[in-house]
Amino acid sequence: MSNNLFGKTFYIFAVVVTLSFLSQGYGNIAEGQGIKGITGITKGNVDLTIPSDPFLGKACRYEVGWPIQVAPRKAALIVGRMISGTGNIDFIDGADLILFDDLANISSDKAIPLSRDIMMPGDSTFIMNGFPIGGFVPFGAKQKDGSPHPYAGTGFGLQGVRLHGIDQSGHFDYRNTLERYYELFQFVYNEKGFRIIKKERVGKHFLSGWDLRGVGLSSAIPDGNDLLVGMTVGFNGGVLSVSGIARWRHKENGWRPVSFVPITGYDEGWGEPSLIRDIDGNLLFSARGFGNESFTAAVWKSLDNGETWKHVIHQKNYHASSPISINRAADGSPYIGANLFPKSRKREILCLWPLNADRTNLGELYIARDAPGEFGPAPSGSWWRIDHPISAVLRLADGKWHGVLTYHIVDNGEVEGFGSPTPHTGCYVEEIFSKGKPIPVWNF
């Protein structure tokens, strides 16, 4: 959220949707949910904009952020950095980690660098860092019986790295990768603060038995002493991809994935998975479809802690061709975050769809952010991107659990063209309000 909390506009979800295509398939948010359910969201100014160390003097802005809990009353954002206005799609200049304990005061002043792009000799190639994910067992966390968690204060980060060739004008094709690998970080947080104690290069076969292709749109969630996180692997020579969950376990050399369960099936390409634990303790999973599934809202459910999965929601022509994620509010209420239909790549309106009580359908659509309505047309003459919604439930300095939703806003002309950064470009951190009593993620 904005540094000025009072500059936030809180509003109750009360959007009346009049478009005819929205009149089918939407249930009632309150159906069977008792006292639980989402009631509103803050709508504030950009929280993280200009990093303190821009890349090669170019226009650099913060973009997508993954929230994690690091201590009983402290959280962090693992946030990507984007180079604007170079005509290069997905020009990601690494990532920073930013600690915070108050949604009204998130600042990059003491950002901890995780990775940076590296220009190669002769400037004909460069190493570019992609989206990062992370998982963490907070310092001070306890097990269910009240004993200390054996791995409290430790966690991991994983970030894709790609080697690209560039031409004399500085352009590259993001689809043409000369080499791909990953960087694995081992994190520690204690009385001395946050530290990166190890950084190593790992190959695409890092996930044993699978060809690792990408990370997801949610941070890892706890499962006993392990952490679970969505990841994507390739098959059929890398032409198609399947998404699922990886189980991470702490070993002598730090956190490592020990197993992977595919979920989405092999009939279409799927990526950018997200994972939450539902109110009843069961797992809910979503992923972004490609090809014939580009506009599909899909949810899978597991009743046996991730061993087997059932496809419970499959709504075609539901959202724009853009990232989609499953999220949870502080009271555990699950909801989908994605961009408004119609069938296009445009991402100008971010919407939330609560799941119904038996998790077989999506509830009434609510608009979380309308960029053209708030900011006017995109300055470059292109269109706005409000994308990559990612959530977490965090305990902050006030001792309360907060449902948090992060997302990115940028003029598409900055991403695909030569547009300049706007005053609205950057990473946003909002609070989702809900009716029910908060469900703690960790035992402190």
Image (cartoon, grey):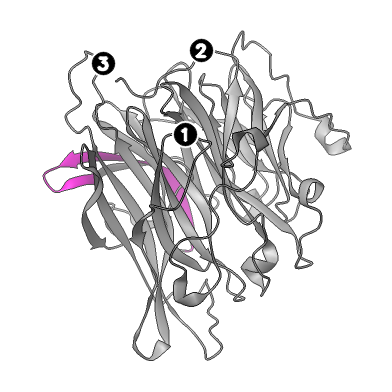
Q: CA distance from mark 2 to mark 1?
A: 20 Å
Mark 1: which amino acid? Asp
Residue at 61% in and 16% down: 357
Compared to residue 118, the image places residue 421 above or below, namely above
Residue pointed to by mark 3: 144
Mark 2: which amino acid? Lys
Report the label total.
3
Q: Is residue 253 magenta?
A: yes
Disc 3 element: loop
Who comes first in sequence, dot 3 or dot 2?
3
Q: Quadrant of the N terminus?
A: top right
> 417 or 314, which lies in front?
417
Kindly check if marks 2 and 1 are in contact, taking CB atoms under 8 A apart as contact: no
Residue pointed to by mark 1: 102
> 233 or 184, which lies in front?
184
Residue pointed to by mark 2: 437
Who comes first in sequence, dot 2 or dot 1?
1
Q: Quadrant of the C terminus?
A: top left
Task: Write down the region rendered in magenta.
Answer: 239-256
Q: CA distance from mark 1 to mark 3?
A: 27 Å
Residue at 29% in and 32% down: 138
Eye-nearest disc, 3 or 2: 2
Q: Is residue 110 left or right of residue 40?
A: left
